[in-house]
């Protein structure tokens, strides 16, 4: 007889975020290895149809959030918990000792890495200090601060908490900059990241670098984003800046990514060096564009990617690899092989 399946909880599985991506990736492991339990704050979450047991939990901002998750872990004999959104990542990071005390694997990065990467100005300064040349940026409390970058176009967004390009804007002149800074409420208490717009959408990549939870490098992968549909575009506007090298349209991607799984050597080498400098434990996702000056990184997400299931389809299943290493005691050969190719997405309807 085989071993009993390992019970794994994935939270925030609804809403099209990385929780759903992790769930889809683990569903692809079809050898009966895992018993999947899904949690979400929405009782009508359509992804509940994909799991063996369902758990309704409060939002991560609720003081009882961690208690509710741990109660569910006890009820279903959970051995590993995957977060599905950034607020949950922060909540789990702050309560990691409670999960360890209950012998529950929490595959997340060190708290210092999480907090550094989720602050886009700090992570940009970190890259700059190591010579990785990110897009030029300024942390602005006012229009006068933002005007230090006296060139256009610019990308303006909150310096924390703008996952999926929320509250992100492409700015092409001072009048637009003035309006957006006012709209976002820039102040010393509400600092705004103003960043150089770089490259073209055809050269945008989302790159995963995977280490085990002891910091040992395992593998890396890139997805060259396909930015042509309403699903994966947050912003698409005509380029009026006069800078023809940026293409006809200025584009900001959404959190729903798709594209070509590939292994561009220069980009992967750069991202592996960044992950090593961060001392990553687990997954990290690095976003940037290839330019004439090299790969320009504009965001580091210290978590699983919105392309986790796409990668898993090609044989690069990050959540499965971490479970195999840390729960099942397997040895994984670094730089294991995976397939390359284009993976596209569309909408799927569900009757709930």
Image (cartoon, helix red, strand yellow):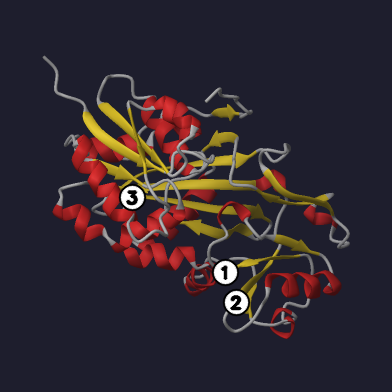
Residue under label 2 = 191
Dot 2: within a 10 Å radius of its alpha carbon, few (fewer than 14), some, or many (20 or more) residues?
A: many
The secondary element bearing badge 2 is classed as loop
Task: Please give the name of the residue rendered at 14% of the width and 55% of the height, measured from the top-left corner.
Answer: 101
**Quarter the N terminus occupies:** top left
Q: Residue at x 64, y 52 (%)?
A: 290
Task: Measure the alpha-carbon separation of dots 3 and 1.
Answer: 24 Å
Q: In the visual, does 296 lie left or right of 92? A: right
The image shows residue 282 at horizontal and vertical percentages of 33, 50
**Looking at the image, how many numbered discs can be counted on the residues?**
3
Point out the tag, 3 or 1, that comes first from the N-terminus: 1
Q: Left or right: where does residue 304 sit relative to residue 3?
A: right
Q: CA distance from mark 2 to mark 1?
A: 7 Å
* Distance in Å between CA atoms under marks 2 and 3: 30 Å
**Closer to us: 203 or 110:** 110
Residue reaching furthest to the left: 1
Mark 1 crowdedness (10 Å alpha carbons): few <14, some 14-19, many ≥20: some
Q: Nearer the viewer, mark 3 or mark 1?
A: 1
Q: Mark 2 vs mark 1: which is more N-terminal?
A: 1
Residue indicated by mark 3: 282
Residue at 51 percent across and 43 percent down: it is: 17
Q: Is residue 296 above or below residue 207?
A: below
Is 95 left or right of 253, judged from the image as shown?
left
In the image, which disc is placed on residue 159? 1
């Amino acid at each position: 007889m085989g071993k009993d399946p390992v019970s794994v909880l994935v939270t925030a599985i609804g809403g099209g975020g990385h929780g759903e991506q992790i769930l889809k990736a683990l569903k692809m492991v079809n050898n009966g290895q895992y018993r999947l339990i899904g949690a979400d704050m929405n009782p009508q979450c359509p992804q509940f149809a994909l799991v063996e047991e369902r758990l309704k939990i409060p939002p991560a901002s609720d003081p009882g959030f961690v208690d509710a998750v741990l109660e569910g872990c006890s009820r279903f004999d959970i051995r590993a918990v995957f977060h599905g959104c950034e607020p949950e990542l922060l909540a789990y990071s702050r309560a990691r000792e409670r999960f360890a005390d209950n012998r529950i694997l929490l595959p997340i990065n060190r708290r210092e890495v999480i907090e550094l990467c989720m602050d886009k100005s700090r992570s940009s300064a970190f890259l700059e200090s190591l010579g990785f040349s990110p897009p030029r940026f300024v942390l602005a409390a006012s229009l006068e601060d933002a005007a230090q970058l006296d060139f256009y176009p610019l990308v303006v967004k909150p310096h924390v908490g703008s996952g999926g390009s929320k509250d992100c804007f492409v700015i092409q002149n001072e009048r637009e900059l003035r309006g957006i800074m006012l709209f976002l409420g820039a102040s010393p208490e509400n600092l705004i990241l103003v960043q150089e717009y770089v490259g073209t959408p055809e050269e945008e990549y989302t790159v995963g670098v995977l280490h085990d939870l002891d910091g040992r490098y395992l593998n890396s992968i890139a997805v060259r984003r396909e930015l042509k549909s309403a699903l994966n575009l947050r912003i698409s506007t005509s380029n009026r800046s006069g800078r023809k090298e940026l293409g006809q349209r200025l584009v900001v991607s959404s959190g729903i990514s798709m594209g070509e799984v590939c292994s561009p050597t220069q980009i992967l080498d750069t991202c592996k060096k960044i992950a090593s400098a961060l001392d990553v434990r687990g997954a990290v996702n690095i976003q940037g564009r290839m330019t004439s000056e090299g790969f320009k990184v504009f965001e580091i997400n210290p978590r699983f990617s919105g392309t986790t299931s796409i990668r898993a389809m090609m044989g690069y299943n990050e959540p499965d690899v971490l479970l195999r290493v840390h729960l099942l005691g397997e040895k994984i050969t670094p730089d294991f092989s995976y397939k390359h190719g284009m993976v596209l997405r569309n909408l799927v309807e569900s009757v709930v």
